[in-house]
Image: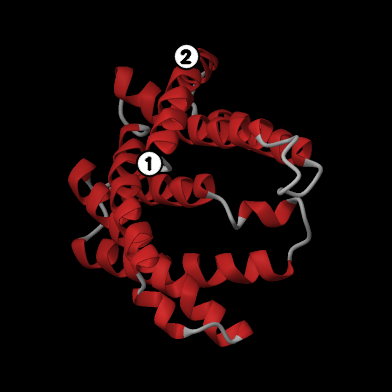
Amino acid sequence: MRTGHRTVALTAVVGGFLLGFLDFVWIKWVPYPFAELGNSTATWAVAAFAFGYWARSGWLRSAVGAAVLLVVAVPSYYLAAALIQGDDLAVVWAPASLLWMVFGVLAGVVFGIGGDWARGAGWRQVLGTALPAAVFFEEAARFARRADDPSYPSGSVWNVAIDVALGVLAVVLIGRSARQRALALAAALPLSVIIFVGFAVAGG
């Protein structure tokens, strides 16, 4: 059953507000290492995927709705920071915030479409199912890469384990058969490399 236009639009805006606000709350009060799931590009990307998977509205509306979700989440996050710990509200329209919104559009389009594809068939279904695992695996690789960096908290091995476990769990939950899950896990590995390279290029 296709979700109506108004429901998709309203859910994107309200969901984005809740994602950003509750993300800051999570970071503020949940202990390490689980707090890192709030400060996580993978978590936000999977939220966009979940939106596309839920919408059942075709790839275009899934992409647009997921992009709106992530764009709204950015100022909502900084609003929560201002209300809860007194941060300067001007950061909402700072260049860094606008850059995160641009990244939100890109991630929303890719993962929103991925969520829609995961309900389809054939190679699109496999790629869609693989995307959440890929983004968690990529984040695990970044945690592993900085494990010996003294500027980051010790215990990154826990973050690696959590991300890998979540990636596998996502495939298990989304996949419809053992064969599809195996193919999705196989596809997630090269996809995670592509995402890793994308972050490296974006970060200079």
- Residue 129 visible? The answer is no
Q: Residue furthest right?
A: 155
Labels in figure, total = 2
Question: Circle 1: is it few (<14), some (14-19), or many (20+) Cα within 10 Å?
Answer: few
Reply above or below: 34 against 98: above
Reply above or below: 36 against 150: below
**Would you name the residue on which mark 1 appears?**
202
Reply above or below: 7 against 63: below
Give the quarter of the image for residue 93: bottom left
- Residue 96 visible? The answer is yes
Judging depth in this view, the residue of 65 and 180 nearest the camera is 65
Q: Residue at x 30, y 24 (%)?
A: 124
**Distance of label 1 from label 2 (alpha carbons):** 29 Å
Judging depth in this view, the residue of 51 and 165 nearest the camera is 165
Image coordinates of residue 157 in percent, x first then y, are 77, 35
Name the secondary structure under disc 1: helix
Name the secondary structure under disc 2: helix
Q: Which mark is residue 183?
A: 2
Image coordinates of residue 74 in percent, x first then y, are 41, 66
Question: Circle 2: is it few (<14), some (14-19), or many (20+) Cα within 10 Å?
Answer: some
Reply above or below: 85 against 49: below
